[in-house]
Amino acid sequence: MKPVTVINLNRILLSPSNKTLDAVSISAPKPLMKQEVDRLSYDVQADPESKIITALDMIRKVPLLSVDATDNIKLRGSGDYKILIKR
């Protein structure tokens, strides 16, 4: 993975021109978390640590989830939930 250089341009002023660009590419990092109406999604592939830590360690990073000393996973302190894995 190439390192990303971030430049804050603050305010950009544009003026009309007759020059045409061949191509423009705009990119942004993918968000790790996405809150939807009925679920909270965590994108493991967007997390740079996903290749070096275990799945249980990834779960420890997800907000609202906790893992106790015996590796039981709780959602807001409850064991009543579903984890959906999308391939």
Image (tube, grey):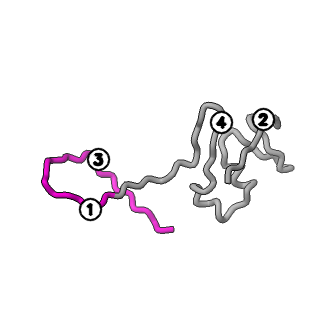
Mark nearer the N terminus (1 vs 4): 1
Task: Measure how far apart labels 2 and 4 are at the Cα level.
Answer: 17 Å
**Between discs 2 and 1, the one toward the N terminus:** 1
For mark 3, give the secondary structure.
loop
Q: Which residues are magenta?
A: 1-24
Residue 77 tag number: 2
Name the residue located 47 percent from the left edge and 68 percent from the top edge. Answer: 2
Q: Nearer the viewer, residue 15 or 78?
A: 15
Q: Which amino acid lies under the numbered mark 3 shown in the image of this protein?
A: Asn
Identify the disc placed on residue 22: 1
Amino acid at circle 4: Arg
Q: Secondary structure at mark 1?
A: loop
Name the residue that disc number 3 marks: 10
Nearest to the eye among marks 3 and 1: give it: 1
Mark 2 crowdedness (10 Å alpha carbons): few <14, some 14-19, many ≥20: few
Residue 18 inside the magenta-drawn segment: yes
Q: Nearer the viewer, residue 66 or 50?
A: 50
State the residue at coordinates (83%, 46%). Answer: 72
